[in-house]
Image (cartoon, grey):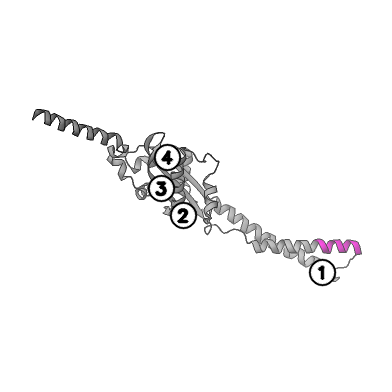
Amino acid sequence: MRQTFLIFLFIVSLIAFLYAISTPKSLFFPWEDRLSEEIILEKVNQRRGVTDIDPLSLDSNLSNLAKIKMEEMFEKQYFDYFSPSGKGIMDLLKEKEYDFDIVEMSIIKGYFEDEESVVDVWIESQEYQDNIYNPIFSKTGIASGYGIYEDTEIFMAVQVFGVPASDCIAPDEDLYSRINYKSKRIEVLEKRIGEENISGASHPIIMEHHSLKEQVNLLTNQYNREALNYQRCLQGIE
């Protein structure tokens, strides 16, 4: 009977040992399993609110970029803005053809007690702090999870910040085309005026030349205003 009991204890101990070495590290830190991307965003927005910056809203496309980046870092075993092949978040944005003018990214890995501690670490970095407090960003995407990194299961999170193209209106390309067309016409007229020695304010060629120059000046001023407003928008300047 005693021998049977000892065999039973041995089997139980063996099962417990095998379970321990095969169980993900995160299961031994149950608080980490409760880390929520929604709560991470809530904590980020609380920090923005302290300085009267509008809250970020989740964007599914940016969340997908964050997920791709996080999974790639686990898969290719690196932790950096750029992949081993040199691709950054802007390259991912172009590949997916998402409609954003600007994107920035914050990354993190380690073991964290709660969502607040994740944001605390980001705030300690000047670059990541700038991302959080930059008023130009209105959209964000977050991905987080556990994976094997350097033979250890570890938590990673990626937050992508974005400026939708619709937020900042680029200068009218048709306006640029009109300026270019009229400017070329002016060059043709000026060449003709010189070659034919045309003069006189009432001459049709002179009158057309004068009218086109005024039009180009007006259109150029309008284009420059639009370009300036676009750049100011991208820089977060009211």
Q: Residue at x 31, y 37 (%)?
A: 25
Query: Is 224 placed above or below 34 here?
Result: below
Residue drawn at the location 29% of the way across and 34% of the way down: 21
- Of the numbered discs 2 and 3, the one sitting upstream in the chain is 2
Q: Where is residue 101 in the image (x, y as percent from the top left)?
A: 54, 53
- The image shows residue 65, relative to residue 179, as above or below, that is above
Q: Earlier in the sequence, mark 2 or mark 1?
A: 2
The residue stretch that appears in magenta: 187-198
Whether residue 236 is visible = no
**What is the C-alpha distance between the residues marked 4 and 2?**
20 Å
Q: What residue type is labelled 4?
A: Ile
User: Which secondary structure class fits the magenta region best?
Assistant: helix
Q: What residue type is labelled 1?
A: Met
Q: Which mark is residue 143?
A: 3
Disc 1 element: helix
- The secondary structure type at the circle numbered 4 is strand
Q: Distance between the residues labelled 3 and 1?
A: 63 Å
Q: Disc 4 designates what residue?
A: 108
Q: Name the residue under label 1.
A: 207
In the image, residue 196 lies in the stretch drawn in magenta: yes
Residue at 70% in and 64% down: 178
Residue found at the far left of this picture = 1
Could you say which is closer to the camera, residue 224 or residue 115? 115
Q: Distance between the residues labelled 2 and 3?
A: 11 Å
CA distance separating discs 1 and 4: 66 Å
Residue 229: where, in percent of width, then height? 59, 56
